Each structure stands twice: as C-alpha cells, then as structure tokens.
Amino acid sequence: MSMNTQGRPTKPGEADGAFHPKTFTGNRGLDMEEPLIFEFASLETTGVDLDEDDSADFELGGHERKAEIGLPGLAEPEAMRHYVRLSRNNFAIDSGLYPLGSCTMKHNPRLNEKMARLPGFGDIHPLQPVSTVQGALELMEDLAHWLMVSTNTSAVAMSPKAGAHGELCGMMAIKAAHTAAGRDPKIVLVPESAHGTNPATAALLRYKVVSIDAKDDGTVDLEALKRTIAEHSGNIAGIMLTNPNTCGLFERDVRQIAEMIHAEDAYFYCDGANFNAIVGKARPGDLGIDAMHINLHKTFSTPHGGGGPGAGPVVLSRRLAPFAPLPFIRKTDKGLELVETEASTAEGEKPFGRMTAFHGQMGMYVRALSYMMSHGSDGLRQASEDAVLNANYIRVGLQDLMSLPFGERPCMHEVLFDDSFLKDTGVTTLDFAKAMIDEGYHPMTMYFPLVVHGAMLIEPTESESRASLDLFIATMRDLVMSAKRGETDRFEGAPYLAPRRRLDETTAARKPVLKWTKPEPAEVTSAAAE
Ligand SMILES: *Cc1c(COP(=O)(O)O)cnc(C)c1O
C-alpha cells in the first residue's frame, strides 16, 4: 500500500497498482452513489401522517389543483439518508481548508449558532407587534452601532441581503442624493480590478461604466483617474472601489482618490467585502468613503448559505445618511419603533424607498453581533492581523516556486499568483486547481481578478493553524514541482478521486438542465399500453 508524505496509507486510486473491486452497488466504501430524489422516491410513501382533509371548501375559485402534485415521497429514514449522503459529497469550511480568495471562507464559531437558536431570536416573526420584539430591535440597534463605530460612519441600512444587494442599496442612495440636488450624472467609474458585481450594479441603475486602469503594481493609476475625471467632469455620479482591492493590495492613495471624487460633487462607494483585512486597523469613514457594504458572511463569520440567506448592511456617510431606505429603527420615549412608511419619517429623512419586504436577516444579525462581542475590539483587530499574517505566510512559502504578478511585496488578507510559473508545462490554472481537489483542498479562486493572466487568488483567513498552513504550502509545492517535472497526467485528468471527475463546465453553464423529466420506460408492451 502506498503511503502519503504524512506516513498514512493513501486512498486507493486507479494508478497505484492495488486491487480495486468493481462493486455491485457502485458505492466505493463509504463513498455512496446517490440517485436524484425523483428517481427512487415513490408517490405513495410519506414521512408524516396527516388526517385526510375532508372539507371540500376551497377558496381558490376553481384554480385549485386537480391532479396529483407528483412530489416524491420518502419515509423519514429514507429522507434522512438521502440528504446525509448528499451532504457527504459537499466540501465545507467545517471539513477542510477553503482558500477561496475574495470569499473569506472563515470558521463560523458554534457560539454564534447557539445564540441564533435562542427562542427569543429564533422563533420570532417579522409581523409580530413591535412591542413584543423590543429585544430583537435592540440587538439590531447594537449591531448597527458597532458597524458605524468600526467604520466611522453616520448611518447604516440593515436590510440588504448580501454584498451585491448592499452595492445596489448604496448606489441607489447615491442616485437619490444626486436627484435631490437636481443633478443627473450618467457615469460611474470602476477600476479594472473590480469585482464583477460593481459594474453590474452600476449598469443595473443605468449608469455608464467607465473603467480606470491599474498601475504595474496592481493599484489604481491616479494619473489615469485624473484624466478620466477631467474628460467626464460634471457627469460623474461616483466611483466604486474595493479596498483592499481584489489583488489583495491596499490602495494607499485612497484618501487622494476620495478628494478627487468629492471635488467633482461625486460619491465614493467602497466595496467593503474585504473589510475583514482592516477591521480594528482602519476606519473606512476616515478614508473618505460615502457608502460601503459589509458582508457579514465574510468579515463577521456568519455562514455563507447557498446564495443566502445573508446580510449585507450598508454604512453611509453624513451626506448620504438621509437617503437610507425604509424600514429603520427609531428610539422614542416608549421604546424602539420601526419607521415603515414615508409618511412616518421625520424632518430631513428622505428614504429612497424600500429594498426588502421586512427588516433584514435576524439570524445573521445575532451571529454577527455574537462574533463581535466574543472577540471584543482587540480580538477583532487580532483577527484582521492574523488573516493578513496567514496570507503572507503562504506568499512567502510559495513565492520562490509560483509567480507573484506584482512582486514580492506584502499582501493583505489574500495573495494573488498568476500562471507564468506554469509556462511550458502544459498545465493550466484550471488543471492545477482540479489537482488540488485530489489532495483534499477546495481550489482557490481562479481566473479572477481579470487583470492578471491565469489568476490564482488564495485567502486562508485567520481560521487556519500554522500546521494547516504548512501542510497546504507543502502540498502546493509538491504540485508545482510535479507540473515542472512534466507530470501532466496528474493534472489533465484531475480530479481522479472526486465522486464525479471533471465536469464539462462550459456545457453545464451554457445549456443547463434545470428540470428533471421522467425517462420513458425502455419498452412498452401493447398490454401495458392499454
Ligand atoms: C463577495 C464579494 C462581493 C459580493 O458579495 P455577495 O455577498 O456574494 O453578494 C462583492 N465584491 C467583492 C470584492 C466580494 O469579494
């Protein structure tokens, strides 16, 4: 049996010469094959026992369903096994290092989960009378307070559900501010290295996106910015800038950028998704920002759900604060109240509208505040420092073998490599990432940011121990050496050990099959057809 470098037997692969039985079930030991729920469940089975509904009194005016609903039925143990088996095919931050740059896949402390499940937080409903949820509103106020303190800003819109939603909220506040001032500028400036959601947000609001070049060191080119501002003077609504930027570098000229933008009567939107690198070290309000979303699921450790439910509160400067959307909380003598309508706003409050039905994602608020409170300000600062330290530890551990597009200078919370170290090896960034899966790692972010060729963006976060980082670095070094030795087999067919090998991602993206259709029975006899 072959051993890995840690002295443990490796998982049998096709290439190691050992005997690999073709199993009857298709399962490979604890690696279970799991069909789609529609393929094995039956309509007759159910996991619950409900009385027949004998009231024929429908109130749907003839629109009620007449046929069977056709949903698959499972007994409780079948349902349990199906989802547990599927979950075992998942990779998660709870199962291993997840170095997805820009995404901040950090540990979600269990204390947060415990707090979020307290009945007073977990079992409330947004339509409950406000007098019965004063504690929840107070928690929201507390969280809002600390978000404003840590960013030195004047207001925060709590309701956006994710980073991109927060961008939309911040840019709508900016648009409302221009409209209130009788202006209608048409252009939003976006640096080259921006996250795709930035230009998408600007375009959704019908702004024209004008790109700003980067310098050779990966940061915004001030001269290029100056030229662009002069060219479009009077027609610029704002800039959308990420800091630290998506190359993992701190934009040192951020104050000058803010001044140049403000001199144009335009606004500075900061993409705050990377706030986790600077919490406790720098306050974005001091850097001149007017609006910034905070991804609670990145900086403050709330879970990244499968696209939600999340929370992306937006902090606003004094100039933008009046335009914060409904609903918001107001302190009165009788306690906390929710301002739900324009009619109930006070003098000077000019909300641009409403983004969500209710007040926000309570479960995420509880988790984020729990993370803040359990760390304290010194702990939050240390978390940022550790995140930056870990990224630099990886940078230094790999920079002699992999290629740094902007030289061997310190990075922030993530380190960006390009693919020039793979030149002439026949191995691509994609192949390299797939080979990482065989080693038990989720790949890093690939081909983003677009400003470098074959980007590999690695963000370890503060969650990883030194031992975990050492093993990761050693694995990456082994892969690089293997590529340089010309062992292309290890890469071209990778992943060999994942349940589904390499998928045709292009076809999956271009022609997605989103609906299961029951396969025709193979043979229909004339007797059965009758
Ligand atoms: C994650 C991220 C976003 C988008 O945040 P979501 O919560 O995924 O919508 C925007 N910008 C940057 C730089 C990010 O890393």
Image (cartoon, rainbow, N blue to C red):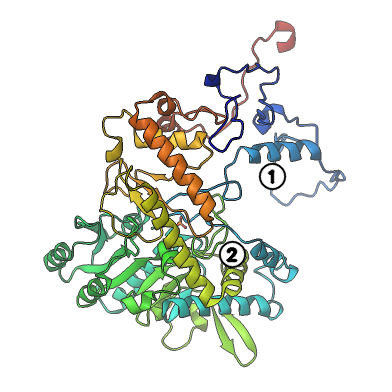
Q: Residue at left 53%, top 48%?
A: 97
Q: What quarter of the picture does the N terminus occupy?
A: top right
Q: Position of residue 197 (x, y in %)?
A: 37, 55
x then y, percent, for residue 254: 27, 71
Q: In which quarter of the image is residue 335?
A: bottom right
Label 1 sits on a secondary structure element that is loop
Residue at (37, 34) in percent of width and height: 481
Relative to 226, is 424 above or below?
above
The amino acid sitting under disc 1 is Gly
Q: In the image, is the residue at mark 1 within 8 Å of ligand 1 by its beta carbon? A: no
Where's the C terminus, which quadrant? top right
Above or below, 476 against 26 in this view is below
Q: Residue furthest top?
A: 526
Compared with residue 508, is residue 284 higher up or lower down, i.e. above or below?
below
Instruction: Name the amino acid, label 2.
Output: Met
| 101 to the left or right of 39 | left
Q: Which residue carries the number 2 mark?
A: 364
Residue 323 horizontal side relative to residue 95, left or right:
left
Question: Visible in this render: residue 289?
Answer: yes
Of labels 1 and 2, earlier in sequence is 1
Q: In which quarter of the image is residue 138?
A: bottom right
Q: Which residue occupies the foreground of this view, 329 or 460?
A: 460
At mark 2, the secondary structure is: helix
Q: Name the residue under label 1.
A: 62
